Amino acid sequence: MVLFTVAYFPSSAAYASIVLWAFGIFTFIMWIATFRANAALFVVFLLLWITFFLLAAGATAAGGYVGILTALAAWYAAFAQVIAEMWGKPAGAWLGPALIKPKK
């Protein structure tokens, strides 16, 4: 009796590419939403959608390097937000201004 079977996908690379394109499109839309957020979050989403599109196109080396830059930018954004909150300072000092100023 077989308790576990593994599905066979003859071309799983194509499916991975489709998923990466889908995440890239979603991340691109989220990046547009960050125009009114701080500059650090803008850079994180910019680099992230570029990473997804490079990986989906098969440029794995370039996608990997941009992915490392994405991780560094995300770590900085998270660090700056936490430090600003803990020290009681405005986060904008470390995170940068928004590209489009929110209407008041």
Image (cartoon, grey):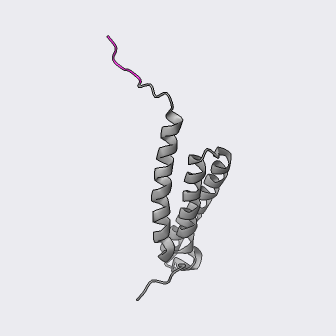
Instruction: Name the one closer to the observer, 1 or 87.
Output: 1
- The residue segment tinted magenta is 1-6
Q: Where is residue 14 in the image (x, y as percent from the top left)?
A: 51, 38
Does 42 lie within the magenta span? Answer: no
In the rendered structure, the answer to whether residue 5 lies left or right of residue 32 reads: left
> Please, which residue is most extreme toward the top here?
1
Residue in the picture at 46% in, 64% down: 29
| Relative image position of residue 86 (x, y in whole percent) | 49, 72
Q: Is residue 6 visible?
A: yes
Question: In which quadrant will I find the N terminus?
Answer: top left
Image quadrant occupied by the C terminus: bottom left
Query: Where residue 52 sits in the image (x, y, percent)?
Result: 55, 52
Magenta span: chief secondary structure: loop
Q: Identify the residue shown where x is 54% and y is 69%.
A: 42
Q: Quadrant of residue 80?
A: bottom right
Q: Is residue 16 above or below residue 76?
A: above
Give the residue displayed 45% in from the left and 58% down from the top.
Answer: 26
Res 79 quadrant in image: bottom right
Q: Residue furthest bottom?
A: 104
Residue occupying the point 56% across, 73% down: 39
Q: Examine the rendering and report whether any part of residue 79 can be seen.
A: no
